[in-house]
Amino acid sequence: MPIQKSHDPKATPAPPHTREAKPERKPWKKKTPVEVVLEQAEKLKAEIAEAEEEIKAKRRQLQKFEEARKIFETS
């Protein structure tokens, strides 16, 4: 025999999203295709700059290893 569930709204706790008062979100502003493309270009520039910094750091590390290798070869 199935268990009867109570349909009393006071008996069940409210969902988490209705318990807390959230600050109002900013209204959504639709972007034009030009804005989307410009934003994507800026993101790519930032990614490229970050990748270049990583490459520079790896080149410095490689240079140190090459210098260490030369030291070991002369010994």
Image: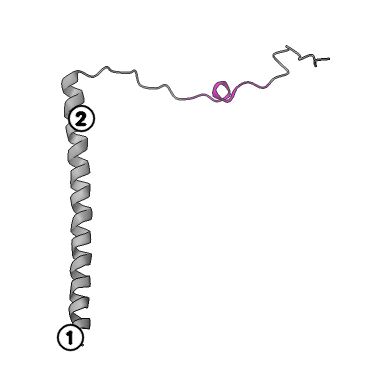
Are the residues tagged 1 and 2 within 8 Å (C-beta)? no
* Residue type beneath disc 2: Glu
Name the residue rendered at 63%, 20% in the picture. 14
* Residue type beneath disc 1: Thr
Q: Is residue 40 left or right of residue 28?
A: left
53 up-or-down from 38: above or below: below
State the residue position of label 1: 74
State the residue position of label 2: 39
| Quadrant location, the N terminus | top right
Question: Is 1 contained in the magenta span?
Answer: no
Name the residue rendered at 76%, 15% in the picture. 5
Name the residue rendered at 52%, 24% in the picture. 21
Where is residue 38? Give x, y as percent.
16, 28
In this view, the residue in front, 49 or 8, is 49
- Secondary structure state at the residue bearing disc 1: helix
**Range of residues picked out in magenta:** 13-22
The quarter of the displayed image where residue 45 is located = top left
In this view, the residue in front, 75 or 53, is 75
Q: Is residue 13 left or right of residue 23?
A: right
Magenta stretch: dominant secondary structure: loop
> Residue most toward the bottom?
75
> Residue most toward the top?
7
